[in-house]
């Protein structure tokens, strides 16, 4: 009798256990199925489009914002954005990444076109059926579909106009530019020169390149200020030139009111220097928006929607008062 009871008990326990296991695995299988079929509004787990977004330098606050803008579109659209770039600015490596994206047959490529060497590679992508959008720096003579970013010539003019107004048309200027070879920096210098050339009281006495690093910007500014001690205004065209210039001023014990400093980009270090009264004006670009909208434009291209030749993102003159207003939510 006791043996029979034990057998019944064992049978009932294994029955209940097998039912529970079956139910558990059934619900797990359902969940897995949902992951495969659904996600964002019934989209597939493998995104519909794979785009490559290739910037100038991964380890850089400005490009991090471009990348974030691009990646954030993944939350809204059925895309995978592969954000990539050389660790340190290196046009050859950037071109290799472009070539890899072509060989990987991505659906679309968004790339900063630093100089004329990018043209053949952009055209190669388009000839192979991969649409290309340029970002931050344009290659208008290439077969790219559209450009999104700053109007770099106009941004240079805006910097020149601001300097003329702020110095009452009297200044001896030294320029530090990211690179002599890069289209956007050339345009930022050309636009600036164009604006100040009508002013008799403004002289540009030196121009050097920083290779977009704060260390070289500091070295070059230091040399420049030694050679031309009459310089009383500095213009920096790439995001870290302002920081390098400020460091050179510090090492030469120059006071803030002895030097007018105008530079590019709202990055934390630049903002801090502006709050300390060292940087007078920052030309604000919109790197996050560039990244985000470049993906939306690429999606338009995927759906054969018409796009314009260029999409210029906003550029603003920012002074310390603007930072305070922004902080106070005014
Ligand atoms: C430019 C970027 C550049 C960055 C470098 C920005 O002002 O728009 O192209 O990579 O400066 O510091």
Image: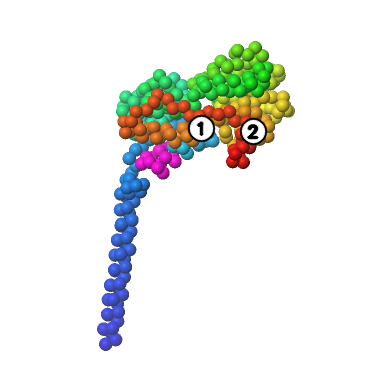
Q: Please report the residue visible at 50 percent of the width from the left and 29 percent of the height from the top.
A: 314
Q: Quadrant of residue 270?
A: top right
Q: Please report the residue visible at 28 percent of the width from the left and 83 percent of the height from the top.
A: 5
How is the model colour-coded? Answer: rainbow
Horizontal side of 200 relative to 306 (left or right) equals: right
CB within 8 Å, label 1 to label 2: no
Front one among 216 and 136: 136
Other-residue count near label 2 (Cα within 10 Å), few / some / many at <14 / 14–19 / ≥20: some
Q: Is residue 58 above or below residue 181?
A: below
Q: Residue lying farthest bottom?
A: 1
Looking at the image, is mark 1 or mark 2 earlier in the sequence?
1
Residue 126's mark?
A: none
The image shows residue 85 at horizontal and vertical percentages of: 46, 33
The image shows residue 278 at horizontal and vertical percentages of: 67, 30
Other-residue count near label 1 (Cα within 10 Å), few / some / many at <14 / 14–19 / ≥20: many
Residue 320's mark?
A: 2
Horizontal side of 275 relative to 73 (left or right) equals: right
The magenta segment is: 71-88
Q: Secondary structure at mark 2?
A: helix
**Dividing the image into 4 quarters, which one contains the C terminus?**
top right
Label 2 residue near ligand 1, CB within 8 Å: no
Residue 286's mark?
A: 1
Horizontal side of 128 relative to 239 (left or right) equals: left
Horizontal side of 236 relative to 76 (left or right) equals: right
Q: Quadrant of residue 22?
A: bottom left
**Dividing the image into 4 quarters, which one contains the N terminus?**
bottom left
Q: Secondary structure at mark 1?
A: loop
């Amino acid at each position: 009798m006791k043996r029979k009871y034990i057998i019944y008990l064992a049978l009932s326990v294994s029955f209940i256990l097998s039912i529970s296991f079956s139910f558990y695995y059934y619900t797990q299988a359902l969940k897995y199925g949902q992951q495969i079929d659904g996600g964002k509004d019934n989209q597939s787990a493998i995104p519909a489009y794979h785009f490559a977004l290739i910037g100038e330098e991964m380890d850089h606050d400005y490009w991090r914002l471009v990348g974030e803008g691009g990646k954030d579109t993944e939350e809204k659209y059925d895309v995978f954005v592969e954000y990539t770039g050389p660790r340190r600015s290196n046009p050859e490596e950037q071109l290799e990444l472009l070539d890899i994206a072509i060989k990987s047959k991505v659906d679309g490529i968004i790339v900063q076109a630093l100089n004329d060497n990018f043209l053949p590679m952009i055209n190669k992508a388009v000839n192979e059926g991969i649409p290309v959008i340029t970002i931050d720096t344009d290659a208008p003579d290439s077969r790219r579909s559209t450009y999104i970013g700053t109007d770099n010539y106009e941004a240079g003019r805006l910097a020149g106009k601001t300097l003329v107004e702020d110095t009452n048309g009297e200044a001896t200027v030294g320029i530090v530019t990211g690179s002599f070879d890069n289209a956007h920096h050339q345009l930022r210098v050309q636009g600036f020169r164009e604006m100040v050339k009508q002013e008799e009281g403004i002289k540009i006495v030196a121009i050097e390149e920083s290779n977009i690093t704060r260390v070289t910007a500091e070295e070059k500014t230091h040399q420049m200020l030694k050679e031309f001690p009459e310089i009383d205004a500095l213009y920096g065209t790439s995001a870290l030139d302002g920081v390098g210039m400020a460091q050179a001023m510090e090492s030469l014990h120059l006071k803030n009111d002895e030097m007018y400093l105008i530079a590019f980009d709202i990055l934390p270090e630049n903002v801090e220097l502006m709050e300390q009264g060292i940087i007078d004006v920052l030309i604000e670009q919109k790197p996050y928006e560039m990244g985000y909208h470049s993906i939306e434009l690429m999606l338009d291209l995927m759906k054969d929607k018409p796009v314009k030749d260029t999409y210029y993102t906003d550029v603003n003159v920012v002074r310390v008062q603007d930072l305070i207003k922004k902080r106070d939510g005014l």
